[in-house]
Image: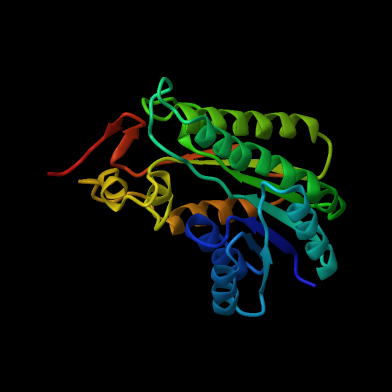
Amino acid sequence: MQNIAVVTGASSGIGAATARRLATEGFHVVAAARRADRLAELVEEIGPGATAAQCDVTSDESVARLAELVAGLGGPVTLLVNNAGGARGLDSVAAGSVDDWQWMYDVNVLGTLRVTQALLPALEASGAGTIVTVGSTAAFTVYEGGGGYAASKHAQTAVVGTLRLELSGKPVRVVEIDPGMVRTDEFSLKRFGGDREKADAIYDGVKEPLVADDIADVIAFTATRPHHVNIDRVVIRPIAQAAQHKVHRER
């Protein structure tokens, strides 16, 4: 049986690109996300090297079912990619929606916690486990309007760093990938409640923002190094983005 890689948030964007890439690297990919129709399309595209798993990372029961499905495949679970997450709104702290902040914390932080807890025994039992968590440059840099998202991503990176310390001496690597500006089909669109104009404005004049395949490439690289090599953190931005607040825009 092939080594198994579980990818959350696999129905679109970085998750879908990562599932495709890991399949080419020889993993049997368990593509997990809420939208079963999108997963079915992705698994059909990848072929026999993938299994769909409908999963909501904010639900204990759903994550337990994911772990059961993975265990039923019978192969060693050597890779978990915690990719499920997202942002809502670009409001100030003073005007921010508590519901939006709650959602971001539930998905970005507690979702990572649930899935990691559920699959950690299998990753350790494989003797060569790797946990890759997709964070954000918002995990270490704040910006106006990004209080809720940055707070959740700061918390997520705290979970990752703590986990790495706690797993010292065990056969599980812990990797964090922190992308800057990545243009995907849905991230900004969801952030702005489907407002296409607002979503497109984020990338206005940016010649070449990163795309999902760029991040998938880095995830695959970290996951396929010799197992004694732990790439703790990768920060990846487009060349047009020198910093969170410094983006070159062509007019």
Vertical side of 10 occupied by 215: above or below: above
Residue shown at 57% from the left, 60% from the top: 10
Nearest to the observer: residue 218 or residue 131: 131
Nearest to the observer: residue 129 or residue 204: 204
Residue 139, position as x, y percentages in the image: 52, 31
Residue 230 visible in the picture: no
Residue shown at 63% from the left, 37% from the top: 109
Nearest to the observer: residue 110 or residue 243: 110
Residue 125, position as x, y percentages in the image: 87, 52
Residue shown at 58% from the left, 79% from the top: 44
Residue 12, position as x, y percentages in the image: 50, 61
Residue 242 visible in the picture: yes
Vertical side of 90 occupied by 6: above or below: below
Q: How many marks?
A: 0
Quadrant occupied by the C terminus = top left
Quadrant occupied by the N terminus = bottom right
Residue sticking out furthest to the left:
251
